[in-house]
Image (cartoon, helix red, strand yellow):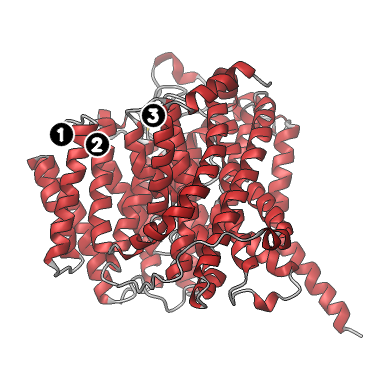
C-alpha cells in the first residue's frame, strides 16, 4: 500500500516543480498601457507566494525524507486496497461523467453518473441503482421545472 | 448607529411568507444534512448555494443561515445515536452523548444537546447584534495595513488549528492564496495565468472552487467507505428536555460555553469544531470529577453543543463586518453574498442596514424555531442515518454538478468544481486540512490588494509599513496566540521542576 511518507514526498516534489514553473511564467506578466508603471509589478505577489509555498513544501519534504516522522509514521494513504479501488474509481467516474456532459449533454451524464459511481463503489443491490436513478430524475425535474435551468 | 426604519424593514422582510418558508426549509435541510455523517455545514451551504441564485437577498441568506445553524445541531443527533459525528463540530459530543445513549438515556442526551445548542445560538446572536455594528464603525476607518494584519491573523490562526503539522497548513494556505492570483490583475490589468482562455480573465470562480473543495472531495472520500453499514438502534430517541433543576445545575457550563463559542467564532478562521473541543476541555478542566467525562454525563454534552452553535453568531462578526470569514462555513456563505451582489464589509452596514438587521432577527428566529422543529423532528430525522452512502455519494455529486451549472450556465465552472474536488481529495488523503486552502482562497484578494497598497503607501519605509496602531495590536495578539502554547508549557515545566527539586 502507498505510505503517507512516499505519497507526501512525491506530492511536495510536484509542488516545488509546479512553483518553479509558475514563477517562470510570472516573469512574462505584462501590465496594460499606462497602468504598467503604477505600483508593484503584477508578478510580485504570485512569485512571493510561490516562494513561500515552495519553502513550506521543502520543509515538509525534509521532514518526510530525512526523519520520516510527521505524525503519521507507518500510515498508509488508503486503509485497504478495496478503499483505494473505490475512491479512485469514483474519481474516474466523476471525470468520465464530466467528459460525457461535454460531449453528449446533461441528460446522458445524469443518466450514467449515478450508476457509474455505484459501480465504482462496488454496489450490487439493484434497488440502490433504482433509487439513485430516481433521485437523478428528481434533481433534473427540480432544476428544469422549478428553477427554469436550461441544459 | 441604530436605524429604527431599517429594523422595521427587517421585520417586514423576515415575516414575508416566502422568507418564513425558506427559514423552515433551511432548518429541515440543515438537520438532514447535519445528521448524514460527513456532510457538514460548509457542504450543506455549498449545496444550497445554487438555489439562492434565483432568490432575493434576505430569503436566500436566511435559508443559508438556517442551514448553517441546523446542520451544526444536526451533527449531534448522529453523534449521540450511532457514535458517528454528523459534522466535525459534533466529535466532542460523541464521548458523552453516545455513552449516554448506550445507557438507554438517548432522549435525555438529545434534549441536552438541543437545549444547549439553542442557548448557545441565542447568546451568540445577541453578541453578534451588539458587537457587529460597533466593529463595523471601527472597521470603516481601516486601511490596507489594517486589513493586511487581519488577513494574516485569520490565515495563521486557521493554519494553526487545522492540523498537527504547521508547514502542511501553511503549504495549502499558500496554495489557496496563489490560486486567487489567476486572472486579470485588478491594479494594472496584466493577464496572469489565463493560459489564453477568456474563462480565466476573472480568475478561478469562488463558488465552484469552494463547492468542489468541500462537497466533491467529501463525495470521493465517502465513496471509499460507502459499503460500510451503520448499526442503529432507534429506541430512546424521544427528546426529553432538561428540567429547570438540571438547567440551574448547568447554568455556569451553559454561560461559559456560550461565551467561549462566540469568542472562538469571532476569531477569523476558527470553526465550530474548535469551539466545541475548547469548551469540552475547559469544562473537564474545571470539573471536580474530570474522570467522569466520557462516561455519559450531561456536562460533556452541554459544553460542546452549546459552544459549537455559539460559534455561528461569532463567525458572522468578522464575516459581515470585515469580509473575513470566521469559519470555513462562513467562507462559503461569503459566496452567497457575492451571488446577491453584496460585498460583506464595514460599508455594508451603512449601505444595507435592513439586510443586516434581517439577518440578526432571522438568526434569532432560526434558533427559536430550531428548538420546536428539533423537538418533534428528531425521531424522524434520525432515521436518515440509515440512508446508505451509496445513495448519498452519487446524488450529492449530481447536485453539485447541476447546481454549479445552474448558477453560471458554464461548463467551465463545472470543470473548476471537479478540479477543486480532486485537489481537495488529494490534499485530504495526504493528511492536509482543507480549511487553510478554502480560507486562503477567500482571503487571497484582500491579502494581495492590501499588501501591495501597504507597500506603495510605505514607499520603501519599514517604519511606515508598520505605522498602524490597530495593525500592530493585531500582530501582537497573533504573536501572543502563537507563543502562548510554548510559553505556558515552558512555565509549567519550570514550575514542575521547582516542585520536584527539593
Q: Identify residue for label 3.
A: B18
Which disc, if any, is residue A66? none
Q: Chain of mark 3?
A: B
Q: Element at badge 1?
A: loop
Looking at the image, tell me whether mark 2 or mark 3 is earlier in sequence order: 3
Q: Is residue B293 above or below residue A90?
A: below
From the viewer's side, name the closer residue of B497 and A151.
A151
Residue A79 percent location from the top left of the image: 34, 75
**Contact, CB < 8 Å: mark 2 with mark 1?**
yes
From the viewer's side, name the closer residue of B381 and A124.
B381
Q: Identify residue for label 1.
A: A151
Q: What separation in Å lies between label 2 and label 3 (alpha carbons)?
A: 25 Å
In this rendering, does residue B177 appear at all? no
Q: What separation in Å lies between label 3 and label 1 (alpha carbons)?
A: 27 Å
Q: Identify residue for label 2.
A: B405
Dot 3 and dot 1 within a common chain: no
- 10 Å neighbourhood of mark 1: few (<14), some, or many (≥20)? some
Q: What separation in Å lies between label 2 and label 1 (alpha carbons)?
A: 8 Å
Residue B273 percent location from the top left of the image: 54, 57
What quarter of the picture does the C terminus of chain B occupy? bottom right
Amino acid at each position: 500500500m502507498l505510505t503517507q511518507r512516499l505519497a507526501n514526498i512525491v506530492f511536495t516534489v510536484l509542488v516545488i516543480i509546479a512553483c518553479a514553473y509558475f514563477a517562470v511564467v510570472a516573469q512574462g506578466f505584462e501590465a496594460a498601457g499606462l497602468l504598467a508603471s503604477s505600483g508593484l509589478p503584477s508578478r510580485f505577489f504570485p512569485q512571493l507566494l510561490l516562494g513561500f509555498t515552495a519553502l513550506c513544501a521543502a520543509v515538509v519534504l525534509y521532514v518526510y525524507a530525512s526523519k520520516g516522522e510527521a505524525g503519521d509514521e507507518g500510515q498508509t494513504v488508503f486503509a485497504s486496497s478495496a478503499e483505494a479501488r473505490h475512491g479512485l474509481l469514483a474519481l474516474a467516474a466523476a471525470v468520465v461523467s464530466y467528459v460525457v456532459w461535454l460531449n453528449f449533454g446533461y441528460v446522458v451524464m445524469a443518466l450514467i453518473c449515478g450508476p457509474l459511481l455505484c459501480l465504482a463503489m462496488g454496489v450490487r443491490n439493484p434497488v440502490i441503482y433504482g433509487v439513485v436513478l430516481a433521485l437523478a430524475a428528481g434533481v433534473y425535474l427540480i432544476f428544469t421545472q422549478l428553477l427554469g435551468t436550461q441544459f | 448607529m441604530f436605524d429604527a426604519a431599517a429594523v422595521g424593514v427587517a421585520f417586514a422582510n423576515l415575516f414575508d411568507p416566502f422568507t418564513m418558508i425558506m427559514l423552515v426549509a433551511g432548518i429541515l435541510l440543515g438537520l438532514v444534512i447535519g445528521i448524514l455523517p460527513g456532510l457538514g455545514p460548509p457542504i450543506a451551504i455549498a449545496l444550497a448555494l445554487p438555489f439562492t441564485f434565483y432568490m432575493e437577498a434576505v430569503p436566500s441568506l436566511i435559508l443559508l443561515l438556517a442551514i448553517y445553524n441546523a446542520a451544526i445541531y444536526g451533527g449531534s443527533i448522529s453523534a449521540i445515536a450511532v457514535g458517528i459525528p454528523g459534522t466535525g463540530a459534533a466529535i466532542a459530543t460523541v464521548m458523552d452523548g453516545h455513552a449516554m445513549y448506550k445507557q438507554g438515556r438517548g432522549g435525555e442526551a438529545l434534549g441536552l444537546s438541543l437545549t444547549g445548542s439553542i442557548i448557545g445560538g441565542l447568546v451568540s446572536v445577541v453578541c453578534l447584534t451588539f458587537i457587529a455594528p460597533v466593529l463595523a464603525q471601527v472597521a470603516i476607518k481601516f486601511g490596507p495595513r489594517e486589513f493586511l494584519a487581519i488577513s494574516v491573523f485569520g490565515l495563521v490562526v486557521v493554519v494553526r488549528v487545522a492540523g498537527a503539522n504547521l508547514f502542511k497548513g501553511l503549504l495549502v494556505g499558500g496554495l489557496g492564496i496563489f490560486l486567487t492570483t489567476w486572472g486579470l490583475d485588478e491594479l494594472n490589468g496584466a493577464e496572469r495565468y489565463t493560459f489564453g482562455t477568456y474563462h480565466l480573465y476573472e480568475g478561478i470562480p469562488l463558488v465552484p472552487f469552494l463547492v468542489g473543495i468541500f462537497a466533491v472531495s467529501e463525495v470521493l472520500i465517502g465513496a471509499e467507505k460507502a459499503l460500510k453499514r451503520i448499526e442503529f438502534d432507534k429506541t430512546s430517541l424521544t427528546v426529553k428536555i432538561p428540567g429547570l433543576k438540571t438547567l440551574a445545575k448547568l447554568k455556569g457550563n451553559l454561560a461559559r460555553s456560550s461565551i467561549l463559542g462566540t469568542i472562538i467564532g469571532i476569531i477569523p478562521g476558527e470553526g465550530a469544531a474548535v469551539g466545541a473541543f475548547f469548551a469540552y476541555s475547559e469544562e473537564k478542566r474545571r470539573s471536580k470529577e474530570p474522570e467522569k467525562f466520557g462516561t455519559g454525563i450531561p456536562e460533556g454534552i452541554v459544553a460542546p453543543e452549546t459552544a459549537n452553535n455559539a460559534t455561528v453568531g461569532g463567525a458572522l462578526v468578522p464575516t459581515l463586518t470585515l469580509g473575513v470569514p470566521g469559519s470555513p462555513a462562513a467562507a462559503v456563505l461569503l459566496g452567497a453574498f457575492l451571488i446577491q451582489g453584496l460585498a460583506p464589509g464595514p460599508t455594508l452596514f451603512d449601505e444595507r442596514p435592513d439586510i443586516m438587521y434581517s439577518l440578526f432577527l432571522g438568526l434569532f428566529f432560526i434558533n427559536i424555531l430550531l428548538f420546536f422543529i428539533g423537538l418533534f423532528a428528531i425521531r424522524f430525522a434520525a432515521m436518515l442515518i440509515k440512508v446508505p452512502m451509496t445513495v448519498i455519494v452519487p446524488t450529492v455529486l449530481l447536485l453539485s454538478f447541476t447546481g454549479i451549472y445552474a448558477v453560471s450556465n458554464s461548463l467551465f465552472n463545472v470543470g473548476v468544481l471537479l478540479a477543486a474536488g480532486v485537489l481537495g481529495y488529494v490534499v485530504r488523503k495526504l493528511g492536509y486540512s482543507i480549511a487553510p486552502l478554502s480560507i486562503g482562497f477567500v482571503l487571497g484578494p484582500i491579502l494581495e490588494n492590501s499588501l501591495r497598497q501597504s507597500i506603495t503607501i510605505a514607499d520603501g519605509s519599514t517604519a511606515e509599513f508598520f505605522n498602524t496602531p490597530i495593525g500592530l495590536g493585531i500582530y501582537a495578539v497573533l504573536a501572543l496566540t502563537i507563543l502562548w502554547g510554548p510559553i505556558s508549557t515552558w512555565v509549567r515545566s519550570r514550575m514542575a521542576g521547582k516542585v520536584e527539586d527539593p
